[in-house]
Image: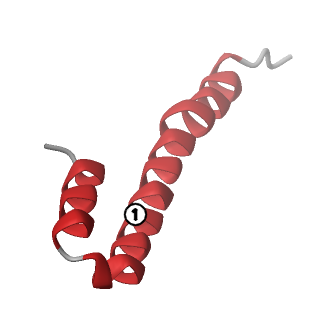
Amino acid sequence: MNLHEQCLLRYLTRPDELSYITEILKINNKILEQKFIVKNILANISMLNYTEDID
């Protein structure tokens, strides 16, 4: 079960904790976004710098 499923299950069992669950999901999404940036964008930039032709 992933974090989103856990949060949904928690919300269904305790709907009064919606704001807490929402904050957890926001933080998790931010972490996933940062991992994506590091993996896909920064890795490509370093590869471009490595293969750049120097005269």
Q: Quadrant of the N terminus?
A: top left
How far from the left and from the top, in percent, is residue 44?
Answer: 62, 27
Which quarter of the figure has residue 45?
Answer: top right
Residue, x 60% and y 39% (percent of image)?
Answer: 42
Query: What's the residue at 50%, 40% (across, down)?
Result: 36
Label 1 environment density (alpha carbons within 10 Å; few <14, some 14–19, many ≥20)? some
Front one among 32 and 46 = 32
Q: Report which residue position mark 1 lands on.
A: 25
Residue for point 51% across, 43% down: 38
Picture quadrant of residue 53: top right
Residue at (30, 51) in percent of width and height: 4
For this rendering, which residue is in front, 7 or 28? 7
Q: Is residue 39 left or right of residue 41?
A: left
Q: Position of residue 52 (x, y in %)?
A: 75, 19
From the top left corner, tell me how far across and down residue 35 is, in percent.
45, 46
- Inspect the image, locate mark 1, and give the three-letter code of the amino acid beneath it: Leu
Q: Residue furthest right?
A: 55
Q: In this rendering, is residue 55 above or below 35? A: above
Above or below, 19 against 50 in this view is: below
How was this image coloured? secondary structure
Which image quarter is the C terminus in? Answer: top right
SS for dot 1? helix
Q: Is residue 18 above or below residue 48?
A: below
Question: Is 6 on the left or on the right of 39, as rendered?
Answer: left
